[in-house]
Structure formats: C-alpha cells, structure tokens
Image (tube, rainbow, N blue to C red):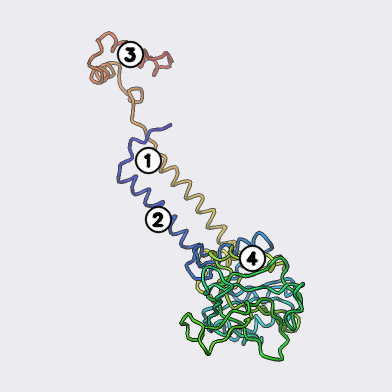
C-alpha cells in the first residue's frame, strides 16, 4: 500500500470537508421537508408511502400537471395530498379530463382550502368540512386520534348507498382529522366513517360541549364523474411516515395501489419538489435533455479521471530512496555514510558497489544486513 507522506493536515481536512459538502448538497437536492412530501423522510412526510407504491405497482411522482394529458384514464390512480397552493383553470381542466376519461383521483386534505378548491374545480360534490373531529371512546393515543371503521362488503347494508368496500382493512388510525360533507341527493358512497361516539369540536376546546353532538362522520367517500372516480379523504395524515403502521393504514394504502395499474403522486401544489427530482423528471421526458445530460456525463467522467490521476500523483508519491537518486558510486558512499553513521566503511562501500551494479544492469540484491 502506498504511503501518503506528502498529505498535510490542512489538505486532508479540506478534502474531507469537500466530500461532506458534496454529500450534504446531494441529500438536500433529493429530499424535502414539506409536510406530506414524497421525499420527506421525517415523521410528517410520505416517503414510506411512496415505497409502498413502488413495491405494489408502477408508481412515479408528477413533476408537472401537463403529465395528466398523457396519463391513461383506466387503471390510473392520481394521489393529491394536502394541496397548499391553488390549481389554475388550465390545470383543473387537465385533471377533470383525466378523471372523466376513466381515471381515479384521490384528494386528501383537512383544514386548508386547497383540497376543496380542487374538488370544486373538477365539479365533484364532496367537500371537507374543516372542523377537527374527536372521539372519546374509539381512539388511538388520545381522543384527537380517532379510529375510523371502514365499510367492508360484509357490512354493506349498514350505510345507505355503499357499494363494496376495502377488503382486509378494519380501521384507519386518524390524526386530528376533519370530515367529509356529502350533500343530500348526491350519488356518493361512504367508504369509511368514525364510530358513533365522534363529535366535531367546533370551538377546539377539547371537550364535548352542549351544542356539539356525537355521531358517525364520513372520513372517506367515493363518487363517480362520468367514466372516472373521485375519492375524498379528510385526513392526509393517514399516509404520513409516523402513522402508516398504525391501525390498518398500510393495508389501506396497499389495497388502493394494488387496485391500479399505475399510481401517480401529484405534489405539484403541495410544496416544492426537490430540484434533483425535478431535473430527473425533465431528463426522462425530453430527448434533448437526455442528449445534453449524456454529453455532460461523458465529459464529467473524463474530467474525473484526469482529476483522479492528478490526485493520485499528488497524494500517492513516496519519498525517494537511494536507489531512485542518480548518483555516482562515491556519492552513494557519502550518502549512505551520512544516513547510517554507525555502519563501518567496508559495509557502506559494499552496498554502494551493489547499487551501482544494479543500475548498470546487474540485478544482485543489496546486502544491507549487519
């Protein structure tokens, strides 16, 4: 192994810092801190949900709403979680056309206006009320974490208008949820609801007041729009990393994804998509971008190899030995004598003679034993 004798402490520190900075930049460019973000690995992100989709079906993250124009309707599930920015009229038209040609759209929100604006923009009838629900009897770690009982086929008769259910899912673990309002006379179905002991905490005081009554509240509904389907979920926290393994939330996600040939996560209006993810999406969708990226990659490899050679030359050099120095035999005698003053003159002369002979083509070993 080559010795790195010429590496100074400042150079080593600079190299380590450079590597650390590159790693941090790449990590920051590929991750997100946005709530419900597909590339957010924190407690409030949905990176684990994206992994479930990847393991279940063909899944991807949309980088632009124009992708809806190219998505097949039948067999495609588009997921919108907690939209925080309004969609434009043109974007709503794209989503509406996607649903009506056979696509399925899952819209999930709780207290912001984004989800309701999207639902109204595609002329769906469901709305999210925006009031937080509590359940003093059927809940997780506190009444603010109520449990929703999903409606299965065996319990189809419990709720008017329910068609089918979600097999293998008995309850959804919620986290400060709201509830879904379905106007009377609409052709919608309740897919999941709270227990009859839930109440809407209108004043958010954490108590069941006289003007607040207990009943079952819809959490997940389904309605048809021409050939497509809109699912409205009043708690996107069902899918976050910290909640995915509570209740049957993971099984619920798997059931949704396995029923589709492809799943597309629409985070275009739910905060920023990481720049590295945006760049990869552009490369995948543009032949010109693919050509430019390939050219830059080849150039980068060439440059990296050159830099590697320079670094190898700089940091891999060893200190010269007596055999590397072009000296006469008498100069070798003087140099060896200075390095080994304890050696006798005969031994020094013998070694110098052998080194000189090696340079002249005689490969005799150098005898430096006492």
Left or right: residue 135 versus residue 336 is right
Q: Quadrant of residue 120?
A: bottom right
**Which residue is labeled 3 in the image?**
351
Residue 345 picture location, percent across and down: 25, 10
Left or right: residue 259 versus residue 16 is right
Task: Report, in whole angstroms, how far the alpha carbon at label 2 lies from the one at label 3.
Answer: 51 Å
**Which residue is labeled 4 in the image?**
248
Task: Report, in whole angstroms, how far the alpha carbon at label 4 lies from the one at label 2.
Answer: 41 Å
Classify mark 3: helix, strand or loop.
helix
**Vertical placement of 11 versus 229: above or below?**
above
Counting residues from the start of the chain, the first of labels 1 and 4 encountered is: 4
Count of numbered circles on the image: 4
Residue 41 picture location, percent across and down: 51, 62
Q: Quadrant of residue 369?
A: top left
Marker disc for residue 314: 1
**Which residue is labeled 2 in the image?**
21
- Between 10 and 251, the one nearer to me in the picture: 251
Q: Nearer the viewer, mark 2 or mark 3?
A: 2
Counting residues from the start of the chain, the first of labels 2 and 1 encountered is: 2
**Vertical placement of 347 versus 90: above or below?**
above
Task: Report, in whole angstroms, how far the alpha carbon at label 1 lies from the one at label 3.
Answer: 31 Å
Q: Label 4 crowding class (10 Å Cα cut-off): few <14, some 14-19, many 20+?
A: some
């Amino acid at each position: 192994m080559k010795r790195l004798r010429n590496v100074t402490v400042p150079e080593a520190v600079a190299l380590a810092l450079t590597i650390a900075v590159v790693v941090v930049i790449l990590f920051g460019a590929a991750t997100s801190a946005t709530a419900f973000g597909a590339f957010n690995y924190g407690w409030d992100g949905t990176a684990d949900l994206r992994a479930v989709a990847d393991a279940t079906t063909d899944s991807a993250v949309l980088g632009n709403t124009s992708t809806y124009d190219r998505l097949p309707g039948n067999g495609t599930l588009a997921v919108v979680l907690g939209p925080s920015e309004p969609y434009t009229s043109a974007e709503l038209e794209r989503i509406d056309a996607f649903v009506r040609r056979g696509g399925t759209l899952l819209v999930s929100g709780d207290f912001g206006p984004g989800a309701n604006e999207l639902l109204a923009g595609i002329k769906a009838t469901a709305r999210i009320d925006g009031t937080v629900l509590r359940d003093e009897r059927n809940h997780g770690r506190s009444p603010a974490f109520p449990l929703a009982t999903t409606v299965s086929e065996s319990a189809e008769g419990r709720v008017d208008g329910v068609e089918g259910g979600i097999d293998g899912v008995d309850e959804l673990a919620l986290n400060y949820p709201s509830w879904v309002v379905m106007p009377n006379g609409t052709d919608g179905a309740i897919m999941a609801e709270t227990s009859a002991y839930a109440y809407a905490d209108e004043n958010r005081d954490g108590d069941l007041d006289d003007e607040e009554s207990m009943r079952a509240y819809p959490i997940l509904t389904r309605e048809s729009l021409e050939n497509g389907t809109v699912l409205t979920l009043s708690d996107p926290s069902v899918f976050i990393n910290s909640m995915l393994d509570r209740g049957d939330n993971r099984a619920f996600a798997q059931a949704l994804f396995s029923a589709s040939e492809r799943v597309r996560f629409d985070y275009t209006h739910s905060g920023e998509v990481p720049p590295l993810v945006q760049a990869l999406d552009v490369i995948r969708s543009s032949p010109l971008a693919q050509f430019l990226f390939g050219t830059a990659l080849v150039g980068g490899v060439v440059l990296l190899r050159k830099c590697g050679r320079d670094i190898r030359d700089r940091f891999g050099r060893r200190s010269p030995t007596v055999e590397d120095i072009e000296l006469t035999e008498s100069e070798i005698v003087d140099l060896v004598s200075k390095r080994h003053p304890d050696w006798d003159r005969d031994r020094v002369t013998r070694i110098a003679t052998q080194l000189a002979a090696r340079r002249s083509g005689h490969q005799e070993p150098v005898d430096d034993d006492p």
